[in-house]
Image (cartoon, helix red, strand yellow):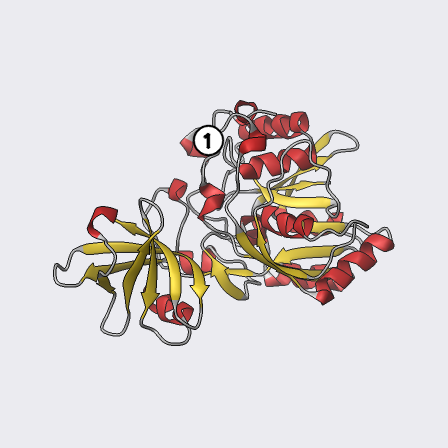
């Protein structure tokens, strides 16, 4: 398939600028691959598509307050520093993006307050820098107090205090993402309790979503696209839960494209999920054959994005495009704060 196969018109009015409250009252479109039918539900109805013994896979990554604003030493020029990933915890070394980049050179120090500053130690790209923070211990806790929520650029509004909670799953646990696993934003604690009471097992995984999730695909031939690497982790306990479910012919229901990519990265030759951690640049697009996922919960994605390509690989290209047209006609809300889709 080609990049232009995933080109469609998505007017800005379809982009949700705020989430529905409560979270689980977002709309849910249900695609049945076997029958080719499309249903319209509310997200809390998702429990009706799960059975005792099934497994729900959740990405427990936590979005940290990645946008910092500081001043350059001596000149006091205002600099935005967007934290991408931690390279070395002990030495407090990070990959970041700076703006305006022309003012930031190796050796410059940027001060955020009287306690936190960083020094530029390398250039990586035109806007990319490697910096060393002065903060011993946990940089995450230091930036949590002064940083801003890294809302996706397409939301196109100022960050508000409520975004710190809204742009975070209720089960987020491990700091490391600069973008939320948005399919998970629809779950409430009450809904998760209901799911567990029905006998569905929870298998948490980690994939720290990076800015690459918003990076445009720039090649027409999809086989030539290179994904950004992102850190993932699958514990022995989660892999055991998933493998037992597969052996018992129970469904593995995966929440989001990020959790899907983590699972599909960790497959053995025998088709089992192995405990593993590391970096993945796995790119899933039609006609990829899935090894683990039986049902996928996801959001409505942007045209020509790697996310819509993964959803298309799972649903089938024609069926997904048909459902997107239907969703637009029915005024579903798109992208991170938008409505949800279950593909089964």
| Residue 108, percent from left and from top | 22, 60
In the rendered image, which quarter is residue 38 located in? top right
Q: Residue 313 or 220: which is nearer the viewer?
A: 220
Extreme-left residue of the structure: 75
Q: Is residue 71 left or right of residue 36?
A: left
The local secondary structure at tag 1 comes to loop
In the rendered image, which quarter is residue 126 located in? top left
Q: Residues within 10 Å of mark 1 (few under 14, many from 20)?
A: few
Q: Residue at x 42, y 33 (%)?
A: 13
Q: Quadrant of the C terminus?
A: top right
Q: Residue at x 41, y 32 (%)?
A: 12
Q: How many marks?
A: 1
Residue 216's place in the image compared with 235, above or below, is above
| Residue 10, percent from left and from top | 47, 29
Q: Residue at x 41, y 68 (%)?
A: 140
| Residue 121, percent from left and from top | 30, 60
Q: Is residue 88 left or right of residue 182?
A: left
| Residue 33, percent from left and from top | 75, 33
The residue pinned by badge 1 equals: 218
Residue 147 seen in this snapshot: no
Q: Residue 63 or 45: which is nearer the viewer?
A: 63
Residue 37's place in the image compared with 127, above or below, is above
Q: Residue at x 44, y 62 (%)?
A: 86
Extreme-bottom residue of the structure: 136
Residue 4 seen in this snapshot: yes
Q: Quadrant of the N terminus?
A: top right
Q: Residue 331 or 236: which is nearer the viewer?
A: 236
Q: Is residue 255 left or right of residue 163?
A: right
């Amino acid at each position: 398939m080609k990049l232009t196969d995933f080109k469609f018109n998505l007017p800005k009015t379809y982009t949700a600028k705020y989430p529905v409250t409560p979270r689980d009252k977002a709309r849910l479109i249900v695609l049945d691959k076997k029958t080719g039918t499309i249903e319209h539900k509310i997200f809390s109805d998702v429990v009706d598509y799960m059975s005792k013994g099934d497994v729900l896979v959740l990405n427990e990554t936590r979005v940290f307050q990645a946008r910092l604003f500081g001043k350059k030493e001596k000149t006091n020029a205002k600099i935005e520093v967007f934290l991408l990933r931690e390279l070395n915890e002990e030495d407090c070394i990070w990959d970041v993006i700076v703006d305006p980049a022309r003012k930031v050179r190796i050796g410059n120090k940027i001060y955020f307050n009287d306690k936190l500053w960083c020094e530029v130690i390398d250039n990586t790209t035109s806007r990319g820098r490697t910096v060393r923070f002065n903060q011993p211990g946990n940089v995450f806790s230091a930036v949590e107090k002064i940083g801003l929520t890294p809302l996706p650029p397409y939301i196109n509004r100022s960050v508000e205090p409520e975004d710190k909670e809204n742009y975070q799953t209720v089960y987020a646990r491990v700091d490391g993402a600069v973008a939320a696993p948005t399919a998970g934003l629809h779950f409430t604690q009450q809904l998760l309790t209901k799911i567990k009471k029905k006998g569905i097992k929870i298998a948490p995984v980690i994939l720290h979503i990076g800015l690459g999730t918003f990076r445009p695909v720039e090649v027409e031939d999809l086989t030539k696209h290179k994904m950004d690497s992102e850190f993932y982790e699958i514990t022995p306990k989660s892999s055991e839960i998933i493998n037992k479910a597969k052996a018992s012919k129970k469904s593995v229901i995966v929440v989001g494209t990020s959790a899907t990519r983590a699972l599909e990265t960790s497959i053995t030759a025998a088709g089992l999920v192995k405990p593993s951690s590391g970096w993945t640049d796995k790119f899933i697009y039609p006609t990829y054959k899935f090894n683990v996922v039986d049902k996928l919960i996801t959001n409505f994605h942007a045209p020509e994005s790697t996310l819509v390509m993964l959803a298309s690989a799972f649903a089938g290209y024609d069926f997904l495009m048909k459902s997107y047209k239907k969703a637009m006609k029915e005024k579903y809300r798109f992208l991170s704060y938008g409505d949800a889709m279950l593909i089964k």
